[in-house]
Amino acid sequence: MKVLDFALEMEQMGKSYFERLAGETTVGGIRTVFNLLAREQQELYDTFLAMKRGASAHCNADSQALERARDRFAEIFAANGTAVDLLKEDLEAYEHAMKVEADIVRFFEELAEQERNEESRALLREIAAEERRHYDVVESIHDFVAAPKWHLNWGEFSNLKEI
């Protein structure tokens, strides 16, 4: 199986997964989070498509490991794996997304380690790096959203002096 074809298929699956979660929730903020993540999956799809169309030597690399791993990857986006009604706030939605993205990064890193073909291994590592950047974006947004819960930065406490 061609590595980039597999990556494109997985990004489509991820986009559908987040769109489904957005459609299932009744909480507007969580819907926005999942729609944002679906758009991010589309951007990754576009990135991988550009890689496929590019002149990179290893873009058409075949991988035997991918055939064995397809079912394992599908489990990440399994419909029974998420109870959207349990997500009550935006932060929980981002935490769920971070878990999914971490699983994807780990999946591609493990696949790269198992791959025997050097071109396929290089391409899988490149895909893992793109997925890692995507995870970092989701994590940064999560940290921004969570900051008010973690820090007490009120002005009345910032200039404490003895009187």
Image: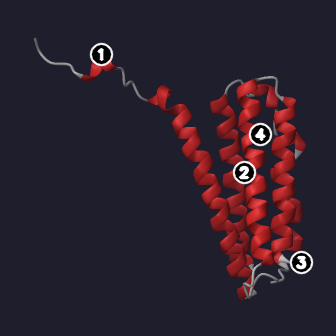
> Dot 4 lies on which element?
helix
Report the residue at 73% width, 30% height from top. Answer: 30
Camera-side residue of 124 and 44: 44
How far apart in space, not on screen, are marks 4 and 2 (Cα)?
A: 9 Å
Q: In the picture shown, does residue 51 fall above or below 76?
A: below
Looking at the picture, how far across and down is residue 29, in whole percent? Answer: 70, 27
Q: Which residue is outermost to the top? A: 163
The residue to which callout 4 is attached is: 35
> Dot 2 lies on which element?
helix
The residue to which callout 2 is attached is: 40
How far apart in space, not on screen, are marks 2 and 3 (Cα)?
A: 25 Å
Question: Could one spot residue 113 in this view of the protein?
Answer: yes
Q: Are marks 1 and 2 in contact (CB under 8 Å)?
A: no
> Dot 1 lies on which element?
helix
Identify the image quadrant of residue 70. Answer: bottom right
Residue type of the residue flagged with mark 2: Glu
Q: Earlier in the sequence, mark 4 or mark 3?
A: 3
How far apart in space, not on screen, are marks 1 and 3 (Cα)?
A: 61 Å
The residue to which callout 3 is attached is: 1
